[in-house]
Each structure stands twice: as structure tokens, then as C-alpha cells.
Image (spheres, rainbow, N blue to C red):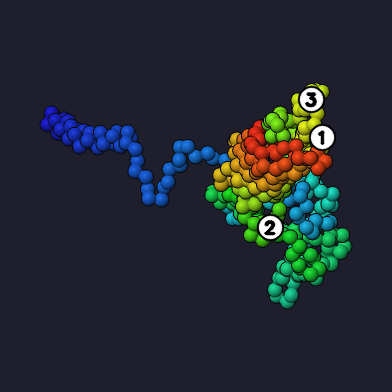
């Protein structure tokens, strides 16, 4: 009996000795980071993950932008006929997408959206020993007949694709009788206009499709309030001035070309003070007009961001007409553009020598520098 107990005790001690290293190894494995497989890519810690419906809202907002600008043609008594989604999107999402598109159409246009239930219906017939299932989608004559009965002028078809890297919403509008396409457009989350607006970018400057197919002129108007020190016949006069500038932007808004029209008034004459002699011409006391041909270089980088202060260097060539005076002018400067509609500019110019007259009498020549500041308002 004692020998039997001794054998069992020895066997138990042997099992514990064998299992103890394995238990220790298992405990060590729990504290060790597992090795990632070759197909596993850990997410970046700083990556910003956007909600699915936030990205979808950007795509639908891009469609809404085209609606507001009248870029969607064929929107007359339209019916959303078919919505196709990628395999990783549940079929129930089709209803949500259809309602979202219908909401934007009705919100931004006066178009009547018509439901076409017969368009989605399937017809089953028995032909001998075969069961035939047909749909109006594959029968143009039946589709045209249904459209006439329902008062549908055009059909809209939608395709939605979702991948972790982005979304694509494709749409087109067609004629039910001829099958001709009136309008087609794809909206990509990677190039979303709504997303660019949220970052403070004017998306029209990076619209590759528009630049590739047509040239759309971008005209920038501005009103300017000046305080300039202008050369007069015998001295320099401090003048208040108003200006109007019209510039066309090109080279992806990096350059501008156009004209500027200015009128100046001697600030002393505004308060009834006459600083010049009676027989001397004061160019800035009466009617005068300055016309310049302008060119500007906008320092905005790859794209213009209204949330940042931008700079612009400009130069103008022209002249000034006043009573008894006609002379040339070269003006240059630099401006700081604040927000979207305001800018402050520093101006300096040079007037080549030109004579001022009273009747046929030469009262002296006008030449030298002009300088001052301007407050610009864009519209």
C-alpha cells in the first residue's frame, strides 16, 4: 500500500515538473504583443475617421450645388427609376438614398418628382413549360407607355459605390422615348466641392473638368478708397480718392488683368482751404480722371484659402487727365487680402514730366512720385 502511494506521489511530481515550463511560457505569451500578419495594416493613430453619413452628405451637397446653379438639365416631371448600390451596401440603403436625392430636388427646384411603381414591377408569364419574368426596365416600349400614362417626362438613374477609401455617386437623366441622355455626372468624395468649402477653399478654381472642357471667365470687381499724396504743379497735395477696378482672373486665379478708373480730390479744398496761388493750376481741385491698365500676381499657393491672409503684387500703366493737364503714370504696389471681400494696399507711382496749362499759358511741369494707401472692397 505504501509503495502504491509512493508511486502516485512520484507520478504527480513528474507531471508538475513537465507542465510548469509550459504554464510559464503561456504567461509570457500573454504579455507579448502578437506579431501582425502580412495582410494586417494597423490604423494610423493620427488618422481622422469620418462618419459614413458625413461623407454621403458631401456628395449630396455637391448635387445640390449643381441644382442651385442650374447645371442639371432634364429636370422636368422626373422620376427616380433605378438605384444600384455596391455589394457591401445593404439593399435597404436604396430607400434612404432615394429620399435624400428627392429632398434636395424638391428643396432647390420647382420640379415635380413622380413615383413610378409600375417601372419597378415585374411580370411573370407561363410559356409552355417555362416561367418568364420580365421587367419594364428591359422593355423600352413598355417603359415609354408607362411614362406617358404617369406623366413622366424624364427618368433619373442612380448608382452608388462605397469603398473604405471613398464613395462615388453617379447619376444620369434620360428620355423615356428615345433613351437619349440629357445629363450625367459623378460625384467623388475624394474631390468633393462641399468638403473643399468646409476647408475654406473656393472649389471653382480647381474644377479640372471645367478647365478641360471650357473656359469660364472669372471677373473680380472692387471699389477702392484712397488717401494718396499726389504731385501738383508746385507742391505735393494730400488727396482723397475713389477708384473702381475690374480684373479678369486666369492661370487658376494666380494672375489678373484689367482696368482701373480713379478720381482724386485735394483734401484741403474739401474744408475750404486753398493752398496754391490763384494763377496756379491745382490738378486735384476740379475734374480729373486717372485710367490704368492693370496686371496683378496673386500669391495664393496651389489653391486660394479665404481663411488665410493672401498677398498680391500689382502694376499699372496709364495716365491722368485734368483741366489743363494730361500726363502719364506708372503705379505699383502690394496688397494684403483679408477674408474674402476686403484688402489693404500700399501704392507707389511715378509721373513722367508733363506740362500743366491755363488756357495757352504753361504754368509749370508735373513729375515725381505719388504714394499712399487704399482700402479695397470686393464684390
Residue shown at the point (79%, 23%) measured from the top left: 273
**In whole angstroms, how far apart are the C-alphas of marks 3 and 1?**
12 Å
**In whole angstroms, how far apart are the C-alphas of marks 1 and 2?**
43 Å
The crowding category of the residue bearing disc 1, from other C-alpha atoms within 10 Å (few below 14, some 14 to 19, many at least 20), is some
Disc number lying in front (3 or 2): 3
Q: Give the quarter of the figure containing the C terminus.
A: top right
Disc number lying in front (3 or 1): 3
Q: Which residue is mark 3?
A: 274
Q: SS class of the residue under badge 3?
A: loop
Residue shown at the point (76%, 40%) measured from the top left: 362
The outermost residue toward the front is 361
Q: Percent x, y for residue 90?
A: 62, 50
Marks 1/2 in contact by CB < 8 Å: the verdict is no
The crowding category of the residue bearing disc 3, from other C-alpha atoms within 10 Å (few below 14, some 14 to 19, many at least 20), is few
Residue shown at the point (83%, 64%) measured from the top left: 146
Is residue 177 positioned above or below 173 on the image? below
Is residue 338 positioned above or below 71 on the image? above
Q: Percent x, y for residue 324?
A: 79, 41
Q: Give the quarter of the figure containing the N terminus.
A: top left
> Image quadrant of residue 336?
top right
Q: SS class of the residue under badge 2?
A: loop
Q: Tell how many labels.
A: 3
Work out whether mark 3 precedes mark 1 in sequence or the reverse, and give the earlier one: 3
Q: Which residue is mark 2?
A: 215
Work out whether mark 1 precedes mark 2 in sequence or the reverse, and give the earlier one: 2
The outermost residue toward the bottom is 128
Q: SS class of the residue under badge 1?
A: loop
Q: Is residue 244 visible?
A: no
> Image quadrant of residue 86?
bottom right
Classify residue 186 as left or right of residue 43: right
Residue shown at the point (69%, 30%) measured from the top left: 235
Amino acid at each position: 500500500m505504501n509503495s502504491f502511494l509512493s508511486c502516485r506521489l512520484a507520478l504527480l511530481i513528474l507531471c508538475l515538473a513537465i507542465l510548469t515550463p509550459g504554464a510559464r511560457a503561456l504567461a509570457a505569451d500573454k504579455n507579448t504583443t502578437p506579431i501582425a500578419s502580412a495582410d494586417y495594416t494597423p490604423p494610423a493613430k493620427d488618422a481622422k475617421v469620418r462618419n459614413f453619413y458625413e461623407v454621403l452628405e458631401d456628395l449630396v451637397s455637391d448635387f445640390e450645388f449643381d441644382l442651385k446653379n442650374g447645371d442639371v438639365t432634364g429636370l422636368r416631371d422626373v422620376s427616380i427609376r433605378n438605384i444600384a448600390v455596391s455589394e457591401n451596401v445593404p439593399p435597404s440603403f436604396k430607400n434612404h438614398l432615394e429620399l435624400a436625392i428627392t429632398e434636395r430636388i424638391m428643396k432647390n427646384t420647382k420640379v415635380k418628382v413622380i413615383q413610378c411603381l409600375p417601372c419597378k414591377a415585374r411580370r411573370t408569364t407561363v410559356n409552355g413549360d417555362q416561367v418568364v419574368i420580365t421587367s419594364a426596365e428591359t422593355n423600352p416600349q413598355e417603359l415609354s407607355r408607362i411614362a406617358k400614362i404617369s406623366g413622366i417626362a424624364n427618368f433619373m438613374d442612380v448608382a452608388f459605390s462605397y469603398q473604405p477609401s471613398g464613395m462615388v455617386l453617379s447619376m444620369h437623366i434620360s428620355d423615356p422615348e428615345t433613351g437619349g441622355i440629357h445629363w450625367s455626372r459623378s460625384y467623388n468624395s475624394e474631390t468633393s466641392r462641399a468638403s473643399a468649402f468646409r476647408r475654406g477653399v473656393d472649389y471653382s478654381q480647381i474644377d479640372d473638368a471645367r478647365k478641360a472642357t471650357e473656359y469660364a471667365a472669372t471677373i473680380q470687381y472692387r471699389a477702392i478708397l484712397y488717401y494718396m499724396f499726389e504731385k501738383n504743379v508746385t507742391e505735393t497735395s494730400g488727396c482723397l480718392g475713389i477708384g473702381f477696378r475690374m480684373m479678369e482672373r486666369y492661370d487658376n486665379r494666380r494672375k489678373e488683368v484689367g482696368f482701373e478708373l480713379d478720381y482724386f480730390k485735394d483734401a484741403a479744398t474739401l474744408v475750404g482751404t486753398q493752398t496754391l496761388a490763384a494763377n496756379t493750376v491745382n490738378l486735384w481741385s476740379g475734374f480729373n480722371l486717372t485710367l490704368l491698365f492693370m496686371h496683378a500676381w496673386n500669391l495664393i499657393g496651389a489653391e486660394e484659402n479665404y481663411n488665410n491672409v493672401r498677398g498680391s503684387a500689382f502694376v499699372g500703366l496709364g495716365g491722368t487727365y485734368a483741366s489743363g493737364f494730361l500726363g502719364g503714370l506708372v503705379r505699383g504696389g502690394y496688397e494684403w487680402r483679408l477674408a474674402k471681400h476686403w484688402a489693404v494696399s500700399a501704392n507707389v507711382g511715378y509721373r513722367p514730366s508733363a506740362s500743366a496749362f491755363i488756357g495757352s499759358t504753361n504754368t509749370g511741369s508735373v513729375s515725381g512720385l505719388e504714394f499712399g494707401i487704399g482700402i479695397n472692397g470686393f464684390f
